[in-house]
Image (cartoon, grey):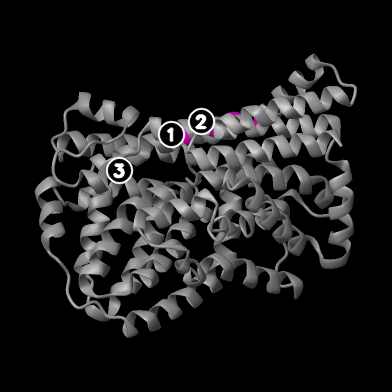
Amino acid sequence: MAIILSFAVFIGAMILCILTGYTMVIALFIGLIAFIICGMKKGFKLGELVNMSRRGSKDALVVVKVLFTIGFITAVWRASGTIALFVYYGMRVITPNLFLIVTFLLACLLSYALGTSFGVAGTVGVIFMALARSGGVNPVITAAVVMSGIYFGDRGSPVSSSATLVAAITKTSLLDNVKRMAKTAIVPFFIALALYGVLSFANPIHGVDNTFMTSLQSEFNISLWCIIPALCMSVLPLLKVSVLHAMWASIISGMIISVSLEHMSFVSLIKGMFLGYVSEGNLGNIMNGGGLISMIEVVAIVAISSTYSGIFEGTQMLRGLQDKIGGLMNKVGRFPSMVIMSVITLSIFCNQTIATMMCNDIMKKLYKDSGATKEELALDMENSVILMAGMVPWTIACSVPLAFMQVGYEAVPLAVFLYLVPLCYGVQKKNKLIYVKTI
């Protein structure tokens, strides 16, 4: 009964924060207190529970370091014109029948380079939605295409915060996980591309407003030098350079370009890296943002959520739930059970990060006991809870990007990449076409 009451308090706090607009960090603190009290009811001392939470938080240290570095990247890529370069040349290749195809591919490319769904939805998503509305393209279809594209990178990029989190909590290699995710994304990607190709020809754009192109050229020096930060992130990991070192190479090269090519003062650049980039032209509503400050709430969520893992593991308070899920797993298999758990945790906690932590806490022992590797656990979570967060209408992962693009939840059914990955992966796994092992 104590564990049920603790979860009720936690869920109630989450709902209240969502309805009032307060940060989820508050709900997480309330939940932490509730679970500590629950542990004390089970006979554990306060000091023991604090030590358990401290052990759990160790998993967050690597993630926090990467998240803050990602914050620097999101600002530097704005300042250096890297994002502007992709958008500029992406818009130049647009022809009436290719609008949705270009939108999808550019969203995939930038989300993979930046590893963020929100950042791309708030830049490329906003830009292409404006073009769609002015050019007579269905905005709902356009938003769905963007949603598919932004979660291509949010799931499978080496600089994705979600990929970093999954690697940390499952104690697996981030780059090896990325390779596995790439393999299981090939079929869904080309199916989505084919579908959006058909829709693109059926919904051609009737004209492109060149005003935005002019604004980009006036505010940024659109040079091929601007692609260097992106090349650092995409090429160096392939050469066995650690992700963190590749990220800093991207940051340093972006800083050099920002000062030398974009003529940004060093003081303004450093300020932007911490507090977020601020446009000096008329592109502020699209280009502003990023910086270390943009990652503080996410870092706090990850840090506090990780303390739950230590408490749950140390007190065994999830044992009853794990027994029930174990019975389900024996009937339907590991991945279908993970999908069901993903839907439940996302529906309750409305947050991709928290749902991921909960899925790991509940499922990792069941996977181990059933003979699965930790690599399989990581891939199953990447192909379920990470993507399905964009499918549940009331989760932040779904509602925020749609709010950026000013469309409703009717766009979700056409965001086909989000559910093609779980479907294709589930079929392949059922037919024994996928064998997850350490690379």
- Tag 1 and tag 2, C-beta contact below 8 Å: yes
Vertical arrangement, residue 416 with respect to residue 387, above or below: below
Range of the magenta residues?
A: 58-69
**For the residues bearing labels 3 and 1, Cβ distance under 8 angstroms:** no
Name the residue: 27% across, 26% down. Answer: 271
Q: Give how far across and how far down residue 269 sits, in percent.
A: 24, 30
The kind of secondary structure element at disc 1 is: helix
Q: Earlier in the sequence, mark 3 or mark 1?
A: 1
Visible residue check, residue 436: no
Residue drawn 52% across and 42% down? 19
Q: Quadrant of residue 41?
A: top right
Residue 125, position in %: x, y?
Answer: 33, 58
Report crowding for label 3: few under 14, some 14 to 19, many 20 or more residues within 10 A (C-alpha). many
Query: Which residue, given by chain and number where applicable, does mark 1 sit on?
Result: 69
Q: Which residue is mark 3?
A: 77
Instruction: Tell me the chief SS of the magenta region.
Output: helix
Q: Alpha carbon of mark 3 to alpha carbon of mark 1: how far?
A: 12 Å
Q: Amino acid at mark 1?
A: Thr
- Where residue 413 appears, as percent x and y from the top left, is 51, 71
Residue 61 falls inside the magenta stretch? yes
Residue marked by disc 2: 65
The C terminus lies in quadrant:
bottom right
Q: Position of residue 219 (x, y in %)?
A: 13, 46
Q: Residues within 10 Å of mark 1 (few under 14, many from 20)?
A: many
Q: In which image quadrant can residue 316 be found?
A: top right
Q: Amino acid at mark 2?
A: Lys
